[in-house]
Image (spheres, rainbow, N blue to C red):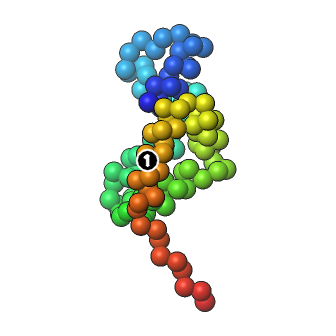
Amino acid sequence: MLLALVRADYEKEHGAVPNAGAMLQLVIGDQAFAWLRPLSTLLVELDDKDLVPDAVAARAAVERLMSSGNAFSAHYLAVLQSTPSIAAEHAEVMRIVNGLPRPLPRASA
Protein backbone atom coordinates (compact mmCIF):
# COMPACT_ATOMS: atom_id res chain seq x y z
CA MET A 1 0.00 0.00 0.00
CA LEU A 2 2.85 2.38 0.79
CA LEU A 3 4.49 1.76 -2.58
CA ALA A 4 1.15 2.30 -4.32
CA LEU A 5 0.79 5.65 -2.58
CA VAL A 6 4.25 6.81 -3.64
CA ARG A 7 3.60 5.53 -7.16
CA ALA A 8 0.35 7.51 -7.36
CA ASP A 9 2.17 10.68 -6.29
CA TYR A 10 4.89 10.00 -8.85
CA GLU A 11 2.36 9.43 -11.62
CA LYS A 12 0.56 12.70 -10.83
CA GLU A 13 3.75 14.54 -11.65
CA HIS A 14 5.29 12.35 -14.36
CA GLY A 15 2.44 10.42 -15.97
CA ALA A 16 1.60 6.74 -15.84
CA VAL A 17 4.28 4.15 -15.30
CA PRO A 18 3.81 1.84 -18.29
CA ASN A 19 4.63 -1.57 -16.80
CA ALA A 20 6.06 -3.51 -13.88
CA GLY A 21 9.59 -3.40 -15.28
CA ALA A 22 9.52 0.38 -15.52
CA MET A 23 8.15 0.55 -11.99
CA LEU A 24 10.96 -1.66 -10.69
CA GLN A 25 13.51 0.61 -12.34
CA LEU A 26 11.94 3.62 -10.65
CA VAL A 27 11.92 1.95 -7.24
CA ILE A 28 15.57 1.00 -7.65
CA GLY A 29 16.88 4.23 -9.09
CA ASP A 30 14.55 7.20 -8.97
CA GLN A 31 14.92 9.80 -6.24
CA ALA A 32 11.15 9.90 -5.63
CA PHE A 33 11.36 6.36 -4.26
CA ALA A 34 14.72 6.68 -2.47
CA TRP A 35 13.18 7.19 0.97
CA LEU A 36 11.51 3.74 0.69
CA ARG A 37 14.80 1.90 0.18
CA PRO A 38 15.59 1.51 3.89
CA LEU A 39 12.25 -0.25 4.31
CA SER A 40 12.97 -2.52 1.35
CA THR A 41 16.39 -3.30 2.82
CA LEU A 42 14.83 -4.13 6.18
CA LEU A 43 12.33 -6.51 4.59
CA VAL A 44 15.15 -8.37 2.84
CA GLU A 45 17.18 -8.49 6.06
CA LEU A 46 14.24 -9.83 8.06
CA ASP A 47 14.00 -12.70 5.60
CA ASP A 48 17.68 -13.66 6.07
CA LYS A 49 18.49 -15.54 9.29
CA ASP A 50 22.16 -14.59 8.92
CA LEU A 51 21.31 -10.89 8.99
CA VAL A 52 18.47 -10.98 11.53
CA PRO A 53 18.88 -14.21 13.48
CA ASP A 54 16.04 -13.92 15.99
CA ALA A 55 13.00 -11.99 17.24
CA VAL A 56 15.10 -9.70 19.44
CA ALA A 57 17.19 -8.64 16.44
CA ALA A 58 14.06 -8.22 14.32
CA ARG A 59 12.46 -5.94 16.89
CA ALA A 60 15.64 -3.87 17.17
CA ALA A 61 15.89 -3.52 13.38
CA VAL A 62 12.29 -2.34 13.05
CA GLU A 63 12.61 0.07 15.97
CA ARG A 64 15.82 1.49 14.47
CA LEU A 65 14.06 2.15 11.15
CA MET A 66 11.05 3.73 12.84
CA SER A 67 13.12 5.97 15.10
CA SER A 68 13.28 9.63 14.28
CA GLY A 69 16.23 11.20 12.60
CA ASN A 70 16.70 8.97 9.58
CA ALA A 71 15.79 9.44 5.92
CA PHE A 72 12.90 7.01 6.08
CA SER A 73 11.19 8.17 9.27
CA ALA A 74 10.60 11.79 8.25
CA HIS A 75 8.75 10.82 5.07
CA TYR A 76 6.98 7.96 6.76
CA LEU A 77 5.67 10.13 9.59
CA ALA A 78 4.15 12.51 7.05
CA VAL A 79 2.43 9.58 5.30
CA LEU A 80 1.14 8.23 8.62
CA GLN A 81 -0.36 11.61 9.47
CA SER A 82 -2.04 12.03 6.09
CA THR A 83 -3.17 8.50 5.20
CA PRO A 84 -5.47 6.74 7.68
CA SER A 85 -5.26 3.35 5.95
CA ILE A 86 -1.47 3.30 6.22
CA ALA A 87 -1.68 4.50 9.82
CA ALA A 88 -3.98 1.54 10.57
CA GLU A 89 -1.55 -0.90 8.94
CA HIS A 90 1.31 0.69 10.85
CA ALA A 91 -0.56 0.20 14.12
CA GLU A 92 -0.99 -3.50 13.35
CA VAL A 93 2.68 -3.94 12.46
CA MET A 94 3.75 -2.15 15.63
CA ARG A 95 1.38 -4.31 17.70
CA ILE A 96 3.21 -7.35 16.36
CA VAL A 97 6.65 -5.79 16.85
CA ASN A 98 5.78 -4.80 20.41
CA GLY A 99 4.96 -8.44 21.09
CA LEU A 100 8.50 -9.48 20.17
CA PRO A 101 11.04 -9.86 22.97
CA ARG A 102 13.24 -6.93 23.90
CA PRO A 103 17.00 -7.23 24.24
CA LEU A 104 18.16 -8.02 27.73
CA PRO A 105 19.45 -4.96 29.61
CA ARG A 106 23.21 -4.69 29.69
CA ALA A 107 24.85 -5.24 33.03
CA SER A 108 26.49 -2.12 34.41
CA ALA A 109 30.23 -2.25 34.90
Which quarter of the figure is the C terminus placed in?
Answer: bottom right
Residue 74 lies, in percent from the top left, at 65, 41
| Residue found 32% across the figure and 59% down from its top | 49
Q: Residue at x 46, y 68 (%)?
A: 102
- Residue 104 x/y as whole percent: 47, 76
Q: Quadrant of residue 48?
A: bottom left
Q: How many marks?
A: 1
* Residue 10 figure quarter: top right
Q: Is residue 25 visible?
A: no
In the rendered image of this protein, does residue 71 appear above or below residue 55? above
Residue 52 horizontal side relative to residue 75, left or right: left
Q: Nearer the viewer, residue 29 or 80?
A: 80
Farthest residue, direction bottom: 109
Q: Residues within 10 Å of mark 1 (few under 14, many from 20)?
A: few
Residue at x-position 43% and y-position 47%? 93
User: Where is mark 1, residue-wise?
Assistant: 93
Q: Amino acid at mark 1?
A: Val
User: x and y percent of residue 101 in the render?
Assistant: 41, 67
On the rendered structure, is 39 left or right of 70? left
Judged from the image, the secondary structure of the residue bearing numbered disc 1 is helix
In the image, 92 versus 13, the foreground residue is: 92
Q: Nearer the viewer, residue 92 or 57?
A: 92
- The quarter holding residue 83 reads top right
User: In the rendered image, is residue 17 in sight?
Assistant: yes
Measured as percent of width and height from the top left, residue 76 is found at 58, 39
- Image quarter of the N terminus: top left
**Above or below — where is 55 with respect to 75?**
below
